[in-house]
Amino acid sequence: MQKKAGRSPTVWLCNIVLLTWFSASALASELALNQLRYITEHSPPYNFVEAGELKGPAVDLLLMATQQAGSPVTRQSILVQPWARAYRNALEGPNTVLFNTIRTPAREKLFKWAGPTGSEKYVLIAAKARNIVLHGGADIAKYRVGAVRDDAGESYLRDLNIPSRNITLATNVNSLGKMLKAGRIDMWAFGEDGWRQSLEDSAINPSNYETVYVLKKNDYYFAFSLDVDDKLVADMQQAIDVILQANAKSIQLD
């Protein structure tokens, strides 16, 4: 009597892998926007913590957009982390959204995007008493410049070929403000709209400082980890578009 041939271990393994993949795909597609993990940082004026409450226009936009999409996120569910950790968590996932994230060519394929959530110039700030005048990267390279680790400011400085020995990295903006006041750095790379508030948060008088150079204008976005279902990203984008169009019409009427 001929013995029936059984399935090979390779076939069984392939079946298990396929089943796992289909199960993971099904779970991902069944998630709603309010089941994703949302992470931001303390970085005025778009997203910041004041009296223990997370505030800012980027936070408000997230709440409104998810409400518009029928899957509301609560303010209390949003995580606040130092930027470098938040950025790493968004890269690794799963099902993670990081904001406000500057959309740069280097980051384009690292995330899925919905927005914009705002725009801002990235600048270099220095003490007025220093009378620093800059005309380009060669001038900047003469000074010690601070930036948040893994932030766009660090990327812009490296694009200008500023030597690593001249770049001081910190995990948060408040640390850089204190370094600037103490003279540990000569300049600080940060957003034009937020540096004054950040200095005030560190009990530093912003009137003693000024913008000495514009690095680049940025657009901010919600950055989704690559495993997030495209439909959820599209739902967020559609909701943002509705809100922005409504605001544009309101401004025109005013």
Image (cartoon, rainbow, N blue to C red):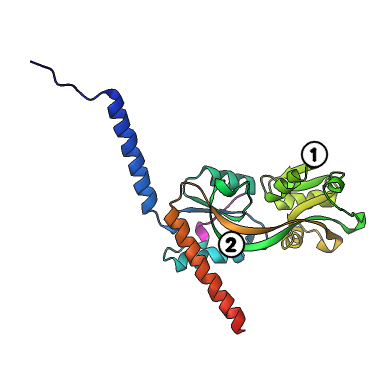
| Of the image marks 1 and 2, the number of the one nearer the N terminus | 2
| Residue 143, numbered circle | none
For label 1, the residue is 163
Q: Is residue 218 above or below residue 163?
A: below
Looking at the rendered image, the quarter that the C terminus falls into is bottom right
For label 2, the residue is 116
Q: Residue at x 56, y 66 (%)?
A: 60
Residue 43 image offset from top left, x and y in percent = 67, 57
Q: Which residues are magenta?
A: 76-82
Judged from this view, the residue extending furthest toward the left is 1
Name the side, left or right, on which 101 lies relative to 186. Answer: left
Is residue 54 at all visible to an observer of this figure? no
Is residue 192 at all visible to an observer of this figure? yes
Q: Quadrant of residue 222?
A: bottom right
Judged from the image, the secondary structure of the residue bearing numbered disc 1 is: loop
Q: Residues within 10 Å of mark 2 (few under 14, many from 20)?
A: some
